[in-house]
Image (spheres, grey):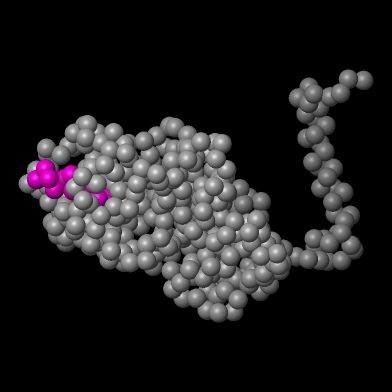
Amino acid sequence: MNVDDLRGTTVGFLASGGLDSCTVTHWLTTRGVRVVSFTADLGQPDEERLEDVAQRMLACGAAEAVVMPLRREMGEAGIAAVQAQATYEGGYWNTTPLAREVTVRGVLPMLRERGIGVLSHGATGRGNDQVRFQLLANMLDPAVEVYAPWRDPAFLEAFGGREEMVDYCARHGLPVRSTRASLYSTDANLLGLTHEAGELESLLTPASFVQPGMGVRPTEAPDRPQRVTIRFEKGRPVSIDGVAVVDAAELFERANAVAGAHGVGINLHLVENRFVGIKSRGVYEAPGMELLGTAYAFVLQTILDRRARRLFDACAGFLAEQVYQGYGADLGSRLAQEVATGVAELVTATVTVELYKGTVGFVSLTDAPHSVYDEENASMSSVGSFDHLDSEGFVRVLGVGARAASLRGQVRRPAT
């Protein structure tokens, strides 16, 4: 689909309010396309007033500018990710992919209400977001068409990159805050910040180059540790330090504040595999996710036996990749999430952790009715129901197979 196909029609454009949003909105309107902009309120810490984003979109030519209240949905997506322990390649909590899914789920009903059949976005042709927007929209509403300016030859002819867009906005007096001197780009929501591009594309640039937006660098964290107690009930964090938390957005606001202050989940460096087949480098922040996710993991250690653990871990890794690639709504993701949801029914416990210079250390775990950890049976002393003598026959049975493998030449034995 290209801009000529859209003349005289209305498109719903997902606008963040940045350089791409302003440029695309104005460029489309000058070519006879009516633009209705939709901005998701995902609890972005870098935008104090999303109404200002709406005003910028109107100033760039949008016929209507809508702010979608999706903070609670963003928080619920974070809880689901914690329950699934779904981190991508080295610990990335998928904060941006989750935001894309929440945004698409939120905008589709609004498009239908207005009779708009085309969804547009400003994601580039090199990144993951173009795939996420496309696949999620296609899955959730197959009737909706998706228009991506960065895959339109006419748009690419006009804009080779960021520099041309900055110049275009300056020529037309558009209210953008970006300049040619921007050191890197940041995508923000309630769950975390993702930093990429610009100076971060060089592997000579350390992660500490990024100025944290959700806390402090671990090296700048307090010299005294802080203990934090989290109560889980059926997989949901319901209180922090004894103070009840009901709203999912409030949960992450509080978790972000306490964890970010100690450098937890701040400036994770990751060179990852994009879905389009190229490597990219990101620096990530997700303090609340890291705090809640680590505390949740401590409970799982006491609940899952080795067979359940193997299945759960496989589903966690699978779901993390699915969400990262934009398949979070398909059958595979739903089945994997059902495993996580089933396990979450057993995650009831009170966990105390210690935050210190970027780390989350275990302190204690109590009131966990579904824990199969038994202190007496785990003991090396002669207590509990586990009799050391019972292991004699168990180990001998295991040894039968070990000897047979060796005698049949399946084991490479040392030379005698």
> Relative to residue 227, is residue 204 drawn left or right?
left
The magenta-colored residue range is 21-32
Above or below, comparing residue 63 to residue 401 in the picture: below
The image shows residue 276 at horizontal and vertical percentages of 39, 34
Q: In the picture, residue 406 is in which quadrant?
A: top right
Q: Is residue 395 magenta?
A: no
The image shows residue 109 at horizontal and vertical percentages of 23, 60
> Relative to residue 39, is residue 373 drawn left or right?
right
Q: Give 237 or 183, whichever is nearer the viewer.
A: 183
What residue is rendered at 31% in x and 60% in y?
Answer: 40
User: Magenta part mainly helix, strand or loop?
Assistant: helix
The image shows residue 329 at horizontal and vertical percentages of 36, 51
Confirm whether residue 262 shows in the render: yes
What residue is rendered at 87% in x and 59% in y?
Answer: 380
The image shows residue 54 at horizontal and vertical percentages of 24, 61
What residue is rendered at 12% in x and 45% in y?
Answer: 30
What residue is rendered at 17% in x and 37% in y?
Answer: 2
> Relative to residue 210, is residue 181 drawn left or right?
left
> Relative to residue 378, is residue 301 drawn left or right?
left
Above or below, comparing residue 317 to residue 242 in the picture: above
Indicate the quadrant containing the N terminus: top left, top right, bottom left or bottom right: top left
Looking at this rendering, what residue extends furthest in the left direction? 8
Looking at this rendering, what residue extends furthest in the right direction? 416
Q: Give 81 or 129, whichever is nearer the viewer.
A: 129
Q: Give 404 or 121, whichever is nearer the viewer.
A: 121
